[in-house]
Amino acid sequence: MSTFWGTHILFSLLIWSALSDKSSSERSGEVTTIANWSIKARSVDQCTPGKVHVLTADNFLETTEDGTFFVKFYEPNCMGCHDFEPIWTDVAQSFKSRANICFAELNCKLARTICKDYELRFEPNLIWLENGEEIQQYDGDLTSPGIKIFIWEMIRLNETRKSAAERPYFHTKPIILLGWFLLAGGVTSYLK
């Protein structure tokens, strides 16, 4: 009778352990999806480091679907946009060594649908995109130092997530150890 219960407990623990492995692997898959967010290198024809890449309604989705983009959404007749132009060019130039970040701009007068999708309230708007997804909208002062601090924060966030993804995941299995004791007879001898 006690061998029956020992075996029953052993199989119950092993099944429970297997189910928890499945759910933890599903969870780690979700974490990996988030943690694999990283700045990827891009081909030279998509974006030139230090320059502002011009996006259009025709190429916006295809171009931004792979890689990291910091996009300025603007309207040509916006006075603030004209005043901001040299600052944007300067910021792009100052991150020239970061070839994996593409500085781009989209004329909202020619791409109204895309700009409406982002629910922009004023111009210029700066949005950090990663693999086609909006990561964060810049809501600080439109000054070169403020924007540079934001970019460094985004780079640091990316590096933190990337290093977290590379760290080994240690998960102890006390239930499997208990199952091995049951199988070896260490605990089942006490049940007799």
Image (cartoon, rainbow, N blue to C red):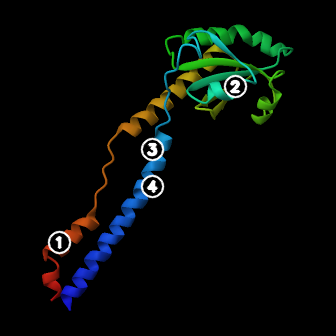
| Residue under the point 38% across and 64% down | 20
According to the picture, the residue beneath numbered tag 4 turns out to be: 26
The type of residue carrying mark 3 is Thr
According to the picture, the residue beneath numbered tag 3 turns out to be: 32
| Precedes in sequence: disc 2 or disc 1 | 2
Q: Is residue 108 left or right of residue 48?
A: right
| Residue under the point 28% across and 79% down | 9
Q: Pointer 2: residues within 10 angstroms few (<14), some, or many (20+)?
A: some
The answer to which image quadrant residue 166 occupies is top left
Q: Is residue 17 left or right of residue 180?
A: right
Counting from the top left corner in percent of width and height, residue 144 is at: 64, 14
The type of residue carrying mark 1 is Phe
| Precedes in sequence: disc 4 or disc 2 | 4
| Residue under the point 50% across and 42% down | 34
According to the picture, the residue beneath numbered tag 2 turns out to be: 60
Q: Quadrant of the C terminus?
A: bottom left
Mark 3 near mark 2, Cβ–Cβ under 8 Å? no
The type of residue carrying mark 4 is Glu
Counting from the top left corner in percent of width and height, residue 48 is at: 58, 11
Choose mark 2 or mark 1, whichever is in front.
2
Q: What is the number of the mark on residue 181?
A: 1
| Precedes in sequence: disc 3 or disc 1 | 3
Choose mark 4 or mark 1, whichever is in front.
4
User: For the view shown, which residue lies furthest in the right direction?
Assistant: 77
